[in-house]
Structure formats: structure tokens, C-alpha cells
Image (cartoon, rainbow, N blue to C red):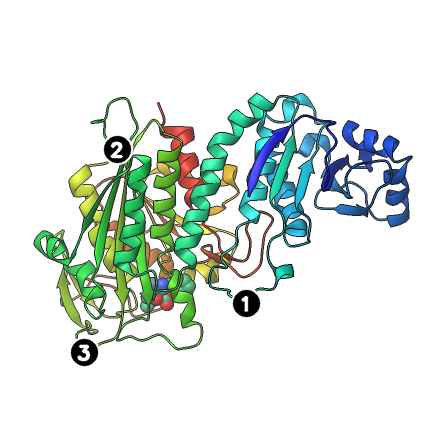
Amino acid sequence: MNVTFVEFGKPQTGTLVLGAFDGAALTPAAKAADKATKGLLKKAIEANGRFTGASGQSLMLLAPAGLTAQRLLLVGLGKPAEFSAAKAEAIGGSVISQLLTSGEKQVLFAIDGLPEETLPAGELEARIALGARLRAYRFDQYRTKLKKEERPSLQKVMVASSDIAVARKAWRPLDDLADAVSFTRDLVSEPANVLYPEEFARRAKALEKLGVEVEILGEKEMQKLGMGALLGVGQGSARESQLVVMRWNGASDKEAQPIAFVGKGVCFDTGGISLKPGDGMWDMKWDMAGAGAVTGAMHVLAARKARCNVVGVLGLVENMPDGKAQRPGDIVTSMSGQTIEVWNTDAEGRLVLADAVYYTADRFKPKFIVDLATLTGAIMIALGGEYAGLFADNEDLASNLLVAAKAEGEELWRMPLNDNYNKLIDSSAADMKNITGGREAGSAVGAHFIGRFTKGVPWAHLDIAGMAWSKKAKATVPEGATGYGVRILNRLVSDFYEA
Ligand code: BES
Ligand code: MN
Ligand code: ZN
């Protein structure tokens, strides 16, 4: 889908999107259209009876006489003082959801009349375009029998701007962001027979074209490093486990201390010998969404040439039951030297992250580490699909993440770490066990386990199990893979760590 910026008032065919504020007050562009159609908009509002201009509302008018457009779509903007970038995105997204497969080929957003101080110049236009692109995402390459009317018809999105050059400039990094989120959604959507660890690593390797340095470690190299925790998870799989190290050195000093993101990349999680029930197991193809988000973040940072040194590390495995699979009760030695009694082979994400996080801390000595993982079902019980859980041992990092998450509409909620939770994973047979044996504080216990492998580097853990996949579309997120986390990490860098 192609986005362009055009002048206000240039006649276009297709759908013309206009705005009305609370009280059904038409914006200047909408007033002009009302005049050109001899009062059609006002009449339609009256005939509809319920359109008040509240945000989220819309009113479609077909074949308006007096305009070149074939349809008018009047959208509610709410109160001018309450307008925001998020609302602009939501308008872009919800209009696209109405038009994408409607038969319409092009749309022009002509939203004006906002008080100047509402948003920085160009931001309104760029955010509408971002919402449009994010909502237009589809993963349908395996649908060979889609009928013509089920396929997207919309090809061209235009956004009217009073300063096209400024709008384009604001759009450039957001266009990169939309590319990256789509890239992550593709990774998360792919089934596990297609996207296994080596294939994931190949797709990460493709970031080299953006200037990211990518190294891939196979099982032999990981054995040499002593990564017994990660390797134990993959040991029942016919697919080789991989560790991917991506580096974007965008700071003026390429040697400056980096920041680091680490992702759980379990390409499929059957549970292993502690096998999951069959019902719903298909969801476990997206148990690599943490790694997907980290890869997408590296994509956008490199594409927009972020002035920061960033390391992205992915622990990629497949968790399978097999004659060679690890057993409950097995004791593995992690790269850190700490031993782990594997009570439950389905608590595998923390085992993968134990080695991936330790490796990152040990090799790069970063300013901080943020790990992202679809780690626990318990976080979905606590927070549902509204927030990811944030666990952090550093106040500045936690607060920066919360600010970034809020700004991007990828909500995060701080959860507690506590020594008493940590003690629950002490083991009498090894240095620790990977579960407590009980159900209490399941997400915090998982976090504490990972926290034992940070080597003292300031650290935050995002449990995104409830956010990686959406069963219901939201304004800028279609059903399916969300790409959650890419926007937070990108904003974290741009707002706090770019020179
Ligand atoms: N990948 C799952 C967590 C998960 C569940 C993510 C549902 C997304 C949707 C993880 O590896 C897992 O199996 N966790 C167990 C941990 C338990 C054995 C301590 C869980 O949450 O049940
Ligand atoms: Mn599991
Ligand atoms: Zn898992």
C-alpha cells in the first residue's frame, strides 16, 4: 500500500475522508464539501440522528453530487483539545478497515481545523498514514482460494497536508516503523514448519542489507560456550537451535557501550516431555514473538539510522517431545555456571533466556538489557490482552519503558519483583529449579529466574504472552500477530538513548 501526501482541495476520485468535531461541527475542509454538495453533509448528519462527531464515529455518504469523489466518509474527531497522535492513528486505521476490501481503490484523508498546538507540524498527516498502514497488514500468502471480493482493493492512500514537505519528513521514520512492525508480524504469523530456528536466523540475516551486523551461532558454538540451558530445550528437536546476534552501531562512537534487547524465540512450544494439551497448541507457533519484536526493533532502528549502539540477541529453539528430549528432573549447566533442575520442560522460555541474557551481559556489557518473551500463561490471567507485564530491577529503565509504551499505545503494567518469590525456585538438587511446583505468582517467578542470569546489568523483562496475538482487531492492529514490542523499543531508543 502506497501513501502519498497531497494538497488540500485538489479534486480526487475515490473516497474522501472529512472530519467533524464534537457537536457535529464540520472542519473547514468538510464545510467546503458541504457547500459543494449543497448541504449534503448537514442533511446526512440530521438524517442519521446519532452522529455527534465523537471520536470513533463515522458516517458514509455515497455518490455525492457536486464532488469528484464517489464516497464521502465523515469521521468524528471528538473535542479539539482532546485530539492526539493516537486518535489520528485510530482514524487512519478504522477508515482503512472499512475500505480495504470494499472495492474502493483509493482514499484521500482531508482532516483539518485542529488547533495548531495539538500536534507538531506534519504529525497529524504522518500518524493517519501510520494507522492506515498498520491496519492494512494482511498475512494471506497461504490463502490460494481467496475470491476477488475478499482481496484488498485499496491501493492508494493519500493524506492532504498544508505542508507536504513537512508531512513527508514526519512520515519517513513512521514508514520505517510500519515496515518493521509488518516484518515482525510476518515472523510471528509464519507456521513452525516454515519458520524454524535456522529459517528465522536467515530472515534476521537479511537485516544486513540495512547495515545491521548479524552473526549466527549454531549448536556447536553454543556447546563451546557452555549454553546447556538453551541447548537442553532444543535437544528433542530435529531442527538445530540457533543464537542470533544483531548489532546496529549508529552512535558517532561505534565503540560506545551499547544497549541490548534479547528475545525468546521458541519457534514451536509443544511443552516437550511435559507435553501441553492438544487444544490450542497451535497458538504455540507464536512463542517466538519476543524474538520477532527484537528483530523488528533492529529493523526500524537500522532503517531510520538511529544514533545509538544497539545489540539484539535471539535464542531460537523448538521445544519437542522425543527420545532425545530432556526429561523432568534433568539437571543442566547454564553458560553462567549455575545449574538448573528442569522440573517442567514446558517452562522452557526461561531456560533459553538464561543463556541468551547471560551471553549478552557477558559479551557486550551493555548499559541495560530488556528481554521480551511470551513467557507465562499467568500474565494473561493477570492482565488479559490489555497490558504486557513489566518486571525491572532498575527504576530509570522501568520508568522509561512505561513512558515509551504509553506514547506508542502498546500498554505495559509494572509488576513486582520480590526476594520471597525468588527463593521459591531454590532447589535441593541444583542451584535452582525452573518452576516452583505451585501456581502462585507464576509470572514473577519466571521473571526472577531470568533475573539470576543478568550478571548485574540493569534489566527489564516484558512478558508479552497476552499481547503478541490478538483475537479481536483493534484500530491499528488487525486480528492475528500484533508486532507488539517493536514500537516500545523504537520509542525507548528515540526518546531516551539517541545522542
Ligand atoms: N509459551 C508458554 C507461555 C504461553 C502460554 C504463551 C500461552 C502464550 C500463550 C510458556 O513456555 C509456558 O508453557 N509456560 C508455562 C509455565 C509453567 C510450566 C510454569 C505456563 O505458563 O503454563
Ligand atoms: Mn512452554
Ligand atoms: Zn513457551
330 relative position to 499: left or right = left
Q: Which residue is mark 3?
A: 323
Q: Quadrant of the C terminus?
A: top left
Q: Earlier in the sequence, mark 2 or mark 3?
A: 2
**Comparing labels 2 and 3, the label whose residue is closer to the camera:** 3
Image x and y of residue 109, in percent: 68, 36
Q: Residue at x 78, y 47 (%)?
A: 60
Q: Quadrant of the N terminus?
A: top right
Q: Amino acid at mark 1?
A: Lys
Q: Which residue is mark 1?
A: 145
Image x and y of residue 494, in percent: 41, 30
Rendered view: 418 above or below 124: below
Q: Residue at x 85, y 34 (%)?
A: 34
Rendered view: 416 above or below 144: above
Question: Residue 222 versus residue 1: which sits nearer the camera?
Answer: 1
Q: Which residue is mark 2?
A: 258
Rendered view: 110 above or below 230: above
Image x and y of residue 207, in percent: 31, 42
